[in-house]
Image (cartoon, rainbow, N blue to C red):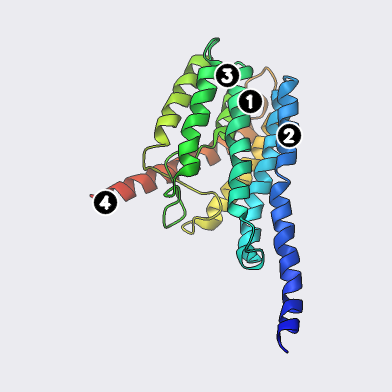
């Protein structure tokens, strides 16, 4: 006699669960638009669409945990769905950008793009990708952010190639990289820095021109760099602490 009321009570949570899965799946739409913009040679628009995909990826996890998606849609693996879309937006599209937008020296594009995609596969297949305190272990294949830095900083192709090689190696090194939303320690500050970095990134991509950004947009560029150094600094400090603890 109690099964029918229980089923009715679970109807709305199930709807929420499938709505969140649908929201995650919608990440392929900005990914498709990003590929189209890249096809047209429009790096700015391609990056902005990747930013839209990144927002979806940042929101779907907290929503899934809040509404207990694994409980109310147990036959569908949202984590696998998320990983498929992440590999597309974090790795495949940035690899195509590296190949086709001149971020690396002529003749090195396909090698660099292949290297990016191959090293990222280890990250996505690594069962120890996350630590117990929700840091990433090893470079988390955020190549979408790497190409953003190439675009905004205007770094030369040979320097970019060295950075790509170095970050690919860090995929296999157990350094700690901060998760912008899930790490509990200093969480409010980190979320604020994430919002600062995100807003300044969008603005800088939209207004980037031939002039150095430090000259044309000193406030936004300064905020962007400050947030960048915050994330890098926290990750470095936690990696050193982790190494000292093991020793």
For the residue pair 173 and 237, the one nearer the viewer reads as: 173
Q: Dot 4: few (<14), some (14–19), or many (≥20) neighbours within 10 Å?
A: few
Q: Real-space Cα distance between discs 4 and 2? A: 44 Å
Q: Real-space Cα distance between discs 4 and 3? A: 38 Å
- Residue found at the very far top of the displayed protein: 106
- Residue found at the very far left of the displayed protein: 247
Q: Real-space Cα distance between discs 1 and 4? A: 42 Å
**SS for tag 3?**
loop
**SS for tag 4?**
helix
Q: Dot 2: few (<14), some (14–19), or many (≥20) neighbours within 10 Å?
A: some
Residue found 62% across the figure and 21% down from its top? 212
Q: Which residue is mark 3?
A: 103
Q: Which residue is mark 1?
A: 213
Q: Real-space Cα distance between discs 2 and 1? A: 29 Å
Q: Which residue is mark 2?
A: 32
The percent position of residue 65, horizontal first and vertical second, equals: 61, 62
Report the mark closest to the observer, 2 or 3.
2
> Which is nearer the N-term, disc 2 or disc 3?
2
Q: Dot 3: few (<14), some (14–19), or many (≥20) neighbours within 10 Å?
A: many
Q: Quadrant of residue 206?
A: top right
Q: Quadrant of residue 50?
A: top right
211, above or below 57, in the image: above
For the residue pair 7 and 231, the one nearer the viewer reads as: 7
Q: Which residue is mark 4?
A: 246
């Amino acid at each position: 006699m109690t099964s029918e009321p229980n089923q009715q009570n679970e109807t709305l949570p199930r709807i929420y669960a499938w709505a969140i899965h649908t929201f995650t799946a919608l990440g392929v739409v900005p990914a498709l638009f990003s590929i189209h913009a890249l096809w047209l040679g429009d790096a700015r628009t391609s990056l902005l669409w990747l930013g839209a995909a990144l927002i979806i990826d940042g929101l779907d996890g907290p929503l899934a945990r809040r509404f207990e998606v694994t409980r109310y849609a147990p036959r569908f693996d949202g984590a696998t769905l998320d990983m498929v879309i992440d590999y597309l937006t974090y790795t495949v599209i940035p690899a195509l950008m590296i190949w086709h937008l001149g971020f690396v020296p002529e003749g090195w594009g396909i090698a660099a793009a292949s290297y990016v995609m191959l090293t990222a596969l280890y990250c996505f297949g690594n069962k120890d990708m996350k630590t117990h305190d929700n840091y990433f272990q090893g470079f988390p294949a955020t190549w979408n952010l790497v190409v953003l830095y190439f675009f905004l900083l205007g770094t030369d192709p040979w320097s970019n190639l060295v950075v790509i090689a170095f970050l690919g190696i860090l995929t296999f090194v157990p350094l700690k990289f901060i998760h912008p939303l899930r790490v509990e320690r200093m969480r409010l500050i980190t979320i604020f820095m994430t919002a600062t970095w995100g807003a300044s990134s969008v603005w800088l991509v939209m207004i980037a021109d031939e002039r150095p950004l430090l000259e044309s947009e000193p406030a936004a560029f300064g905020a962007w760099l400050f947030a960048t150094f915050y994330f890098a600094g926290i990750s470095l400090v936690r990696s050193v602490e982790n190494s000292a603890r093991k020793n």
